[in-house]
Image: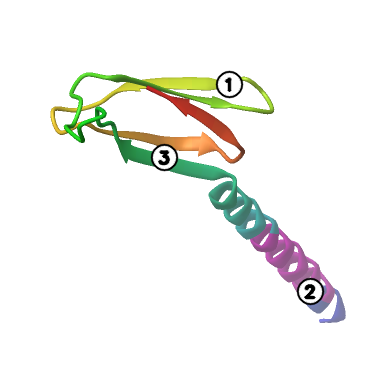
Amino acid sequence: MKAVLLNFAKFFGVSMLTALFCTAAFTQTQATAADLSGTVTDPNGAVVAGATVTATQQGTNLSRTVQTGADGTYRMLGLPAGDYQVTA
């Protein structure tokens, strides 16, 4: 009976550690991604459809480019967290 309890305790301990590490990894993933969105306008305030928008991460020079929609808006999802220079 004692051996069964020890095996259960080991299994339970390993299961709890696995759950803890999986939760920590998921939480870290959520904290390291960012979404960027905005609207491109001209000097008169009119929206600019079809504009090219590029976001370049300052530390790595990683860049992502999208086009604005008919309403001048753009979205970049899942960017690595960091400082970006955005140009249009």
Q: Earlier in the sequence, mark 3 or mark 2?
A: 2
Q: Which mark, by number, is residue 9? A: 2
At 59% from the left and 45% from the top, the residue drawn is 32
Give the residue number, with chain letter if any, for mark 1. Answer: 62
Magenta stretch containing residue 14, yes or no?
yes
At 28% from the left and 31% from the top, the residue drawn is 40
Foreground tag (2 vs 1)? 1
Q: Which of marks 2 and 1 is nearer the N terminus?
A: 2
Foreground tag (3 vs 2)? 3
Q: In which quarter of the image is the C terminus?
A: top left
Look at the image and give the residue range highlighted in magenta: 6-20
Q: Quick one: which residue is furthest to the left in this view?
A: 70
Q: Which mark, by number, is residue 30? A: none
CB atoms of marks 2 and 1 within 8 Å:
no
Give the residue number, with chain letter if any, for mark 3. Answer: 36
CA–CA distance between discs 2 and 1? 47 Å
Which residue is nearer to you in this view: 4 or 88? Answer: 88
Q: What residue type is labelled 2?
A: Ala
x then y, percent, for residue 53: 37, 23
Q: Quadrant of the N terminus?
A: bottom right
x then y, percent, for residue 44: 20, 32
Q: Which amino acid does label 1 sit on?
A: Leu
Task: Kindly state the secondary structure of the residue where label 1 is placed.
Answer: loop
Q: How is the image coloured?
A: rainbow
Q: Quick one: which residue is furthest to the front in this view?
A: 44
User: Label 2 neighbourhood size at 10 Å, few (<14), some (14-19), many (20+)?
Assistant: few
At 58% from the left and 52% from the top, the residue drawn is 31
20 over 65 or under it: above or below: below
User: Label 1 neighbourhood size at 10 Å, few (<14), some (14-19), many (20+)?
Assistant: few
Q: Is residue 1 left or right of residue 68?
A: right
CA–CA distance between discs 3 and 2? 47 Å
Task: Kindly state the secondary structure of the residue where label 2 is placed.
Answer: helix
